[in-house]
Image (cartoon, rainbow, N blue to C red):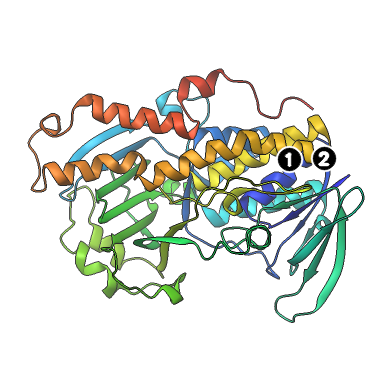
Amino acid sequence: MTVLIAGGGIAGLTAALSLHQTGVDCRVFESVSGIKPLGVGINLLPHAVRELFELGLQDALTATAIPTAELAYFNKLGQCIWSEARGRDAGYNWPQFSIHRGELHLILLRAVRERLGADRILTGHHLAGWEETGGGVRARFIDRQTGATLADAEGALLIGADGIHSAVRQALYPDEGPPVWNGAILWRGTTRAEPFLTGRSMIMAGHEFQKFVAYPISRAASEQGEAEINWIAERKFQPGQSWRREDWNRAGNLDDFLPQFADWRFGWLDVPKLIRAAGPCFEYPMVDRDPLDRWSFGRVTLMGDAAHPMYPIGSNGASQGILDARVLAREIRRAGATPAALTAYEAERRPATGKIVLANRANGPEQVMQLVEQRAPNGFDRIEDVLTPAELEGTAAEYKRIAGFDRDALNARGAIVGPV
């Protein structure tokens, strides 16, 4: 009873560890020939951190990640709109972590190799297609660099955890087309600098059409009295404006965005200085895909960004992929590696993630920043004159409920994957 996983990213590797934890054999097939620690910073919400802790990764995560203490929203002048404690500082039983995506990926990769064996991860294997057999599925692979045909693999199920450009999703929905761009471009980088605010703060400043996000991601830097700050500069263009869409995921050019942030000096954070002091920065479009009516077809299903790519709002992309993996492992343990397990997994996860995709399109909890820009574009003396406490608190609470990390509910519920 082997489960085939197409994609060795965060969701795919978490799925492999979760299946191994429940005694189910699996193999991971990754398109690239060498898995490297790529990317910049991400946030892991407490409900996802809980699952990684229950996979035995607490020590590895704690050794490198920053436990986020607060999330704070500011206007474009650096005036505080809203601030709330996060993770254990907010009473959760688990922290919220800010971490370099590459570090998280390596933690998962090392754990898979140690627990499952290095032979259970095959790199340079791009999924070329599959067919169902009498009691399983046969997957075909190619080496994308050479075009060579590789050996087929047979298993009971095939999981498409191969990202926003998923080969599995494309085969299931050949007419879907490319991801949907919402007009926003993100420039992302990291800078070694002095800590700001609490030293464990995540901040968002600006509004829907121009925003800056920053948070520290390295415990090692913190122990040296510094901060490795992950930052995101975002500009959203009006409908109809063209961009270098053919050059997505390219090296960033400071001239494209730094002038718009030249005056963003808040006293507690100097945005242009932070940007100029960075290493290479990278440009990304803010894209997602429409929620699907169906993920599972026979012995094949989707997971993570292959199933529900979403805007990077509310720190949910990686966290939701981790939750997918855990629910899938639980259902396979209950029903075996069968289509019934995939149906039960989808019944729980597809509606939940679809709501988050749509909430993020509506700007998620960050909508309070746009409301302040609309109501008080020149700043304010008291935030209570611009937004009521009910608007602020209600927006934050509703998003936590939708995304599944309401504190009291999370602290009270049982484990997704219980004792084995």
Left or right of 38 in this view: 82 = left
Q: Amino acid at mark 1?
A: Leu
Q: Residue furthest bottom?
A: 146
Residue identifier under label 1: 342
Observer-nearest residue: 319 or 132?
A: 132
Observer-nearest residue: 104 or 14?
A: 14
Residue 205 versus residue 277 in the image, above or below:
above
Left or right of 148 in this view: 32 = left
Spot occupied by residue 214 in the image (x, y as percentages of width and height): 34, 51
Location of the N terminus (image quadrant):
top right
Spot occupied by residue 376 in the image (x, y as percentages of width and height): 11, 43
Residue 401 versus residue 244 in the image, above or below:
above
Q: Amino acid at mark 2?
A: Thr
Spot occupied by residue 26 in the image (x, y as percentages of width and height): 81, 49
Left or right of 49 in this view: 416 = right
Q: Secondary structure at mark 2?
A: loop
